[in-house]
Amino acid sequence: MSFGPGFLWGAATSSYQIEGAVAVDGRLPSIWDTFCATPGKIDGGDTGAVAADHYHRYPEDVAIMRSLGLGAYRFSVAWPRVQPLGSGAVEQRGLDFYRRLVDTVLDNGIQPWPTLYHWDLPQPLEDAGGWPERDTALRFAEYAQIVHEALGDRVTHWTTLNEPWCSAFLGYATGRHAPGRQDPAASVRAAHHLLLGHGLAARAMPGASVGITLNLTHVTPGTRSAADQDAARRIDGLQNRLFLDPVLLAEYPSDVVEDLARVTDFGFVQEDDLKTIAAPLDFLGVNYYSPMLVGHGTSTGPSAYVGSEHVTHLDGGRARTSIGWEIDARGLLDLLLRLDSDYPAIPLHVTENGAAFDDEVHDAARIAYLDGHVRACAEAVARGVRLRGYFAWSLLDNFEWSYGYAQRFGLVHVDYQTLERTIKDSAHWYAAVIRRGGL
């Protein structure tokens, strides 16, 4: 099962999850620093203050990447490290860190793939209203221009946002993620302004190869009943089409707008917003972890799927990872086939795919997970899908957001007491896949 010589093999991380050094070289708090400091928000009371200390240990981490044969390293830039207040003055020491990181990655024969936003909004912007406010999108475009001007001579591929669904709905609807608000109407406004920020940022980086990364899934109904079919339509609309359609088709899906009518009237969408959001993309990043089986029922507690409270999530009877996510590689294949058939032709990259397991170094379960999903990618390529790359999540064990350090996704084990790195069996397996160019 060969992917061909041009296929890109990489691994991914994000700034707050691995960098640490949260008060070093002028960096000021992000919404995640504030959220972590709020009692009861993070399992175990953990924070990203140290994380994997990638800020200081990046040369060692890049050496590991080279030993594995990675072709690309997908990382994110911390906005509060570059522009601590979210606007105004630029912190050159922060930019210098990313200059050093990019240079080191390139010196080791690896492509840098920076993501401009992986959830660490500068706290002053949240204090001013956060993503529900249109001004945040404008500030994001300014920040994108700053980073592009600093690194654009060495970086070709740029991702604007990582998983805006999470930023909008986990951050502003359920409160499970920073900033921890529970305001359904604000969450929908946040989704729009995140997408607007993407379009404005793409415009602010002329000549760059630009994409966006969406967390997508394959949604199926529990039964063939009309109620379950409608539940699947609703969740697919809020999880997938609410982001795919404006980015790739310059429109919001009418059925989703109707579903959300009692939450918001979409009056915040201004003339030409959708044209801006649908700025031509060079690639689409796809993050996939687990399928979704849903049916008609009653959800409990604040829902990330606002306007769809009469939907319940069902157990598909599959094996699960330690974080509780069902394992189904077929869902990735079905998703890639759908993207290729239902939307305009665009190169795709699986920008995150991986699993958390209760393991140390000998992680046969993770190998099995990755093997199944890489095989799904191979079948997609064989069936004509324009899949151009695969990035394993994650290079390192890291701070896993509201789960703290209890969940390990890494190809490389991190001892959180000593910060020692140990290459796991799954990393050796992945290195062999890269050497062969397939399975």
Image: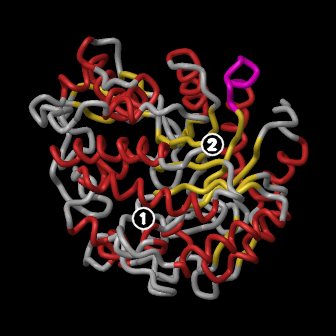
Q: Up-down: is 89 above or below 255? A: below
The residue depicted at 35 percent of the width and 47 percent of the height is 194
Residue at numbered disc 2: 209
User: Hey, what amino acid is under mark 1?
Assistant: Trp
Q: Up-down: is 343 above or below 40? A: above
Magenta residues? 379-387
Q: Earlier in the sequence, mark 1 or mark 2?
A: 2
Asked if the residue at tag 2 contacts the one at tag 1, i.e. Cβ–Cβ closer than 8 Å, the answer is: no
Q: Is residue 175 visible?
A: yes
Within the magenta stretch, is there residue 331? no
* 377 horizontally vs 46: left or right: right
Q: Is residue 439 visible?
A: no
Which of 67/274 is in front? 274
The residue depicted at 70 percent of the width and 66 percent of the height is 102
Residue 111 location (% of width, % of height): 75, 54
Q: Quadrant of the N terminus?
A: top right
User: Hey, what amino acid is under mark 2?
Assistant: Ser
Residue at numbered disc 1: 401
Q: Up-down: is 415 above or below 312? A: below
